[in-house]
Amino acid sequence: MRAAYRLAGTECRPARLDVLEFDVAGRPEIAAMTRAITELVRRHEVFRSWFAVEPDGRVVRHLLSPDEVEMVARVREDVIDSASIEEMVRTGVPDALHWDCFGFGVIEHERSFTTYLAVDRLHTDTVAALPAEADLLALYRREACPGGELRSVLRNRPSAPRKYLVHRG
C-alpha cells in the first residue's frame, strides 16, 4: 500500500489487476446484470473499501455502507476490439487509493456475452476473487431467470465484440 502511495501520479504502473471472466450464451440482460453487480458490491466489503495513507504514515481503511452503493451501466461505443477492451480494463480501474478500484464489464458478442471482474491486487487475489465470480454468476442467474435455468456457459471465446458496457459506482 505504501508503495502504491509513493508511485501515485508517476508513470510507473505495476501490474496490479486480477481479472476474472465468464462467457454466457445468448444476449445479456443489462438491467439484470446491473442489479446483480450492485448486489455483489453491497455484499462484499472488498468492493466497498479503499485505503488512505495518513500524513503520519498510517494506512487507514475506509468502508462505504451497502446503502451507499448503486452501480450504473454505461455503453462504451469507443471500445471496438480486443486491444481497446484491454486498454479500457487496464486504465479504467482506479488504483487502491480510491474507492471503486474494481471494474465490471459486459462484452456483447453476436450470440453470447463475456462478463469480467477486475480488482486491484491490494484488495484481493485471484483465489479470493473466485467466489465473487461464482457469486456474480449466481446473482445474474437469479435476476435474469427467476425459477429457470441460465443459458449454457460457453467454452470457446467468441471473436469480435458487438457492444461493450462498463459498470461504475
Image (cartoon, rainbow, N blue to C red):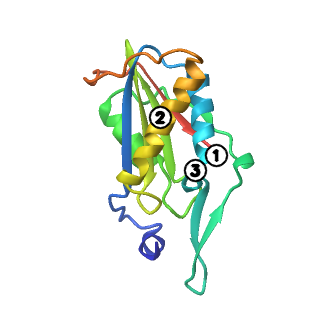
Report the residue that reaches farthest toward the front: 147
Residue 91 screen position, x and y as percent: 42, 48
Q: Which mark is residue 104?
A: none
Image location (x, y in percent) of residue 82: 31, 32
User: Mark 1 touching mark 3, by CB under 8 A?
Assistant: yes
The CA span between labels 2 and 3 is 18 Å
Q: Tag count in the figure?
A: 3
Amino acid type at circle 2 is: Gly
Q: Position of residue 135 (x, y in %)?
A: 50, 38
Which of marks 2 and 1 precedes in the sequence? 1
Residue that carries the numbered disc 3 in the rendered image: 44
- CB within 8 Å, label 2 to label 3: no
Please name whichever residue, 40 or 58, is drawn nearer the observer in this view of the structure: 40
- Give the crowd class for mark 1: few <14, some 14-19, many >=20 residues within 10 Å: many
Q: Nearer the viewer, residue 166 or 28?
A: 28
Q: Is residue 68 left or right of residue 127?
A: right
The mark lying in front, picked from 2 and 3, is 3
Asked which secondary structure carries label 1, the reply is helix
Q: Residue at position x 57%, y 60% from top?
A: 98
- Tag on residue 42? 1
Q: What residue is at 61 percent from the left and 23 percent from the top?
A: 31
Element class at badge 3: loop
Residue occupied by mark 2: 105
* The furthest residue to the left: 156
Q: Pointer 3: residues within 10 angstroms few (<14), some, or many (20+)?
A: few
Q: Quadrant of the C terminus?
A: top right
Name the residue at the bottom extreme: 56
